[in-house]
Image: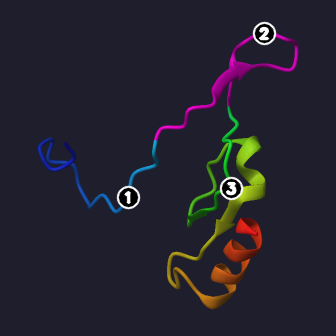
Amino acid sequence: MWAARNMPGEVFGVTPALDNIYFKSLDGGHDTFSVIPSYTYAIIDDGDDFLQTQFNHIVITEPETGLTKEVADKVIQILR
């Protein structure tokens, strides 16, 4: 789809759909997006635009260095 639309760059991976998705807000409404996966996961990314419910699963990398031993160690800690 990316190439068919002549989008720039390259797609390296896709986040799979999660089964446990619901909407909530602090006042009891249903307007804030939240994801509560039922499994252990880690997010490795050089960006910082994540949901608050994902913060304990994020390992931020530097774009210049990518996956380093330090990053891998943090990911292992999360997955344990």
Q: Is residue 1 left or right of residue 56?
A: left
Residue farthest toward the bottom in the current orientation of the protein: 69
Residue farthest toward the top in the current orientation of the protein: 29
Mark with earlier residue (1, 2) = 1
Q: Residue 45 in magenta? A: no
Please say which color scheme the image uses: rainbow
Residue, x 21% and y 47% (percent of image)?
2
Residue range of the region highlighted in magenta in the rendering: 17-34
Check disc 2 and give the amino acid type: Gly
Indicate which label's residue lies in the foreground, 3 or 1.
3
The residue that disc 2 covers is: 29
Q: Main secondary structure of the magenta part?
A: loop
**Residue 32: image location, x then y, percent:** 70, 23
Q: Are marks 3 and 2 in contact (CB under 8 Å)?
A: no
Assess disc 3: are there few (<14), some (14-19) or many (≥20) residues with their C-alpha within 10 Å of its C-alpha: few
Q: Secondary structure at mark 3?
A: loop
Check disc 1 and give the amino acid type: Gly
Question: Does 53 appear above or below 27?
Answer: below
Q: Secondary structure at mark 1?
A: loop
**Residue 49: image location, x then y, percent:** 62, 49
The residue that disc 3 covers is: 40
Question: Does 52 appear above or below 30?
Answer: below
Indicate which label's residue lies in the foreground, 3 or 2.
3
Question: Distance between the Cα atoms at labels 3 and 1?
Answer: 19 Å
Q: Quarter of the image containing the C terminus? A: bottom right
Mark with earlier residue (3, 2) = 2
Q: Is residue 7 left or right of residue 27?
A: left
Residue, x 68% and y 55% (percent of image)?
40
Q: Is residue 28 left or right of residue 34?
A: right
Question: Distance between the Cα atoms at labels 3 and 2?
Answer: 28 Å
The residue that disc 1 covers is: 13
**Residue 5: image location, x then y, percent:** 15, 41
